[in-house]
Amino acid sequence: MCPPPAAGTLAAMNVIETNSLGKRYGGTWALRECTLAIPAGHVAALVGPNGAGKTTLLNLAVGLAVPTAGTVTVLGGQSAGSPAALDGIAFVAQDAPLYRNLPAADLLHLTRNLSRRFDQPYARARLDDLGIPLNRKAGKLSGGQQAQLALTLALARRPRLLVLDEPVAMLDPVARQDFMGTVLTAAAADGVSVLLSSHVLPELERAASYLVLLSRGRVQVTGQVAALLAARQLASLEELALAYLREDSVEVTR
Ligand code: ATP
């Protein structure tokens, strides 16, 4: 597990804070009465079954969706989707969407022109290390390379918060490990806070120090992984998540 931030090393800032946050699509509440506060300095795992509301919560946090009810702020109280919030957040949506017909070099150029900060030497060095040719079109890269390219573009913006929606779902085990290695390095070396949704519990095991578990649009549990494990006398995040999800499915069948 990635160690939680040392006491006193970070200002007591929440990277995401929600209060009775809700999102309804037609007659369906995708997210309901969601109240949570994720402190800075963590790699936070967002876990839950299909349709639990994970993507909805991430979209609300990065300003891609507007709440039906309640509030969401980021980076110590900035309104989600505001210029100040967007400046400090990098988001990689599900399946790392990229302009398939643009070469990696053009994607670097485009992202640099759309961002207030862009660390071009970092981006080039990382693509070089990964063996991703700058002249290759994004659509001609492998799934793992596309994911790494999207992550590189996100990190080169030097965000304070990196938000990833199911980043490793399509990757083979080696690509998965490489991808998560990059995320953990950014968290440990550059102090980037991370929120990532995933169904791949073993991969979260070594990464996450904070957990948000959603089920049927509601927050089931949230808190530091170490404290949650101690409270339930469990040894792993996988056991913890499964325990909560099983309890929830028992509730549903009652
Ligand atoms: P998965 O793990 O399958 O990606 P998720 O936890 O990310 O699921 P969401 O995509 O947030 O779940 O969806 C939550 C609920 O909201 C689902 O019932 C989904 O059908 C519904 N939903 C999400 N987006 C929309 C939309 N744009 N229009 C209508 N319903 C939506």
Image (tube, grey):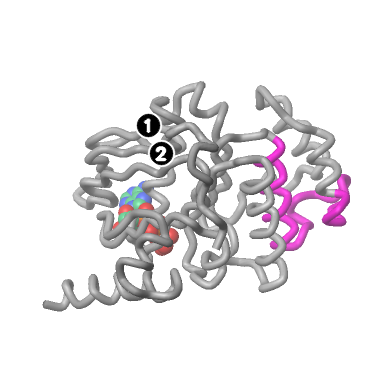
What residue appears at the point 43 percent right and 75 percent down from the top-left corner? Answer: 235
19 to the left or right of 225: left
What residue appears at the point 88 percent right and 46 percent down from the top-left corner? Answer: 135
Residue type for callout 2: Ile
Q: Name the one closer to the observer, 181 or 106.
A: 181
156 to the left or right of 69: right
Residue 161 in view (yes/no): yes
What residue appears at the point 78 percent right and 57 percent down from the top-left corner? Answer: 140
Q: Which residues are magenta?
A: 128-156
Q: Pointer 2 and pointer 1: residues touching (CB < 8 Å)?
A: yes
Residue 163 in view (yes/no): no
State the mark number for residue 73. 1
Provide residue 95's location: percent of width, then percent of height.
Answer: 58, 56
Q: Which residue is situated farthest in the left direction here?
A: 254
Provide residue 215's location: percent of width, then percent of height.
Answer: 29, 62
Q: Earlier in the sequence, mark 2 or mark 1?
A: 2
Ligand 1 in which quarter: bottom left
Where's the N terminus, which quadrant? bottom right
Magenta segment main secondary structure:
helix
Is 84 included in the stretch rendered in magenta?
no
Q: Which residue is mark 2?
A: 16
Rendered position, 116 above or below 111: above
Residue type for callout 1: Thr
Under tag 2, what secondary structure?
strand
Where's the C terminus, which quadrant? bottom left
Q: Name the one closer to the observer, 199 or 74.
A: 74
Q: Crowding near pointer 2: few (<14 within 10 Å), some, many (20+)?
A: many
Provide residue 104's location: percent of width, then percent of height.
Answer: 80, 44
Q: Spatial distance from mark 2 to mark 1, Cα to Cα?
A: 6 Å
